[in-house]
Amino acid sequence: MRAALLAVTASAVLLAPAPVTAATGAAAAATVRCPRAPAPAVSRPPRPSPPAAVPEQRVVGGAGLATSGLVVPAGVGAPPAVTATSWLVADLDTGQVLGGCGPHEYGTPASVQKLLLAATMLPRLDPKQTVTVTAADMDIEPGSSAVGLVEDGRYTIETVWLGLLLNSGNEAANVLARLGGGADGVAGGVRAMNEQAHRLGALQTHAVTASGLDGRGQFTSAYDLALIARACFAEPTFGRYALTEQAQIPAQPAQRTKGFQIQNENQLIYRYPGALGGKTGFTDLARHTYVGAAQRDGRRLVVTLLGAEPAPMRGWEQGAALLDWGFTLPRDAAVGRLVEPGELMATPSAAPSELAVPGTPRPAAASGPVRSGSGWLWSVTALSGAGVLLLGGLLWRRRRRRLP
């Protein structure tokens, strides 16, 4: 009996993974720090407190992603140093996550939230329909980005989409959210965005504004942004809009305004071979955020980053550097996966292990393996429980033999 109990305990210890050890061997750490480029100090408002971390959310896509530090496949080269506080690189087609830094850490989205608006409203709205801009649509924060629509102006929905995605027009976001929000207008549109985020598996995303302007309780994560971007690029219309270099905003004779031309603000489409487009974002609170995608040798990768500073590299340049790194990795390299739309709704009680990637190589950092801090605890708990049951069974059998 004692030997059996010792055997169970020994098995539990052997299955618990060794911690990541620092290069000097003098200390152990639970996470490996992400390569960070030096960035200038900036003055920013205090960040809002994120929601309480939910363990099930942090292991969406695989337990290896439940880290605030670096997670990359074993044996690959280190990713480039960037100023982003969190980032992720994934394959748009297979859904494999190639690497990341704090992929499930909460961040503030800024205008990349407009991608969630696109993923929600593109299938709902007819691009050829002509709409009239209202006074409420023009109610945006002074000094925030606008494309130049005018009150009572009449535009096709396609023109409004181009104003949203090329110039990040906040009044364009209000128009689209209102049109897709039904009787509740913009509020209904924002509610639909949150419902879409939940359907996509973006459990750490909550929209408060349609445009991405900062609002209390508005958050996302690098992983969630990849889910949202994947849904966007699955829409051919989005791909066409995202690669549009310039568009014409028509004149409004009734308002005595002339037509004018707008250009795409995403420099990736001009300067990166194989670029598919994406979205830029900035607020004082969020700092620079970015989503970009590109294709090379039959692969389509997407990069998402939050909380970046524009020096020494701008947001799109940091995204380009991470895309370059991703394209160097083997096609079967992965540390997790992007869940499919509706997958988590179909299995609301899925255990963390059910959300992992079958057959995916164990993720590792540059100096050793990076693993979920709770994974080994579950192993030890389960095996210890088995040991208790075994011990109880042996004692019961011995006591039964002694009874008259």
Image: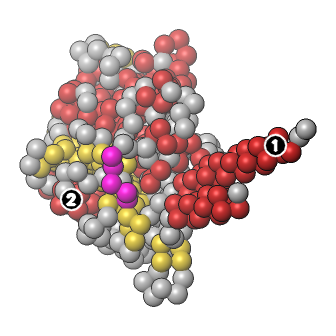
Q: Quadrant of the N terminus?
A: bottom right
What's under tag 2, amino acid-wise? Leu
Q: Nearer the viewer, residue 179 or 31?
A: 31
- Please tell me whether residue 366 belongs to the stretch shown in magenta: no
Farthest residue in the right direction?
404
Whether residue 112 is visible to the viewer of this picture, yes or no, is no
Mark 2 lies on a secondary structure that is: loop
Whether residue 39 is visible to the viewer of this picture, yes or no, is yes
Mark 2 or mark 1: whose residue is earlier in sequence: 2
User: CA–CA distance between discs 2 and 1?
Assistant: 63 Å
Give the vertical position of 211 relative to 291 (above or below): above
- Residue 274 placement (x, y as % from top left): 12, 48
* Residue lying at 44% horizontally and 54% vertically, measured from the top left: 64
Residue 52 vs residue 20: left or right? right
- Residue 333 placement (x, y as % from top left): 26, 54
Q: Using a 10 Å C-alpha cutoff, classify the residue at mark 2 as few (fewer than 14 neighbours), some (14 to 19) or many (20 or more).
A: some
* Residue lying at 65% horizontally and 48% vertically, measured from the top left: 386
Q: Nearer the viewer, residue 17 or 387?
A: 387
Q: Which mark is residue 329?
A: 2
- Residue 106 placement (x, y as % from top left): 53, 51
The residue carrying mark 1 is 401
Give the vertical position of 330 relative to 309 (above or below): above
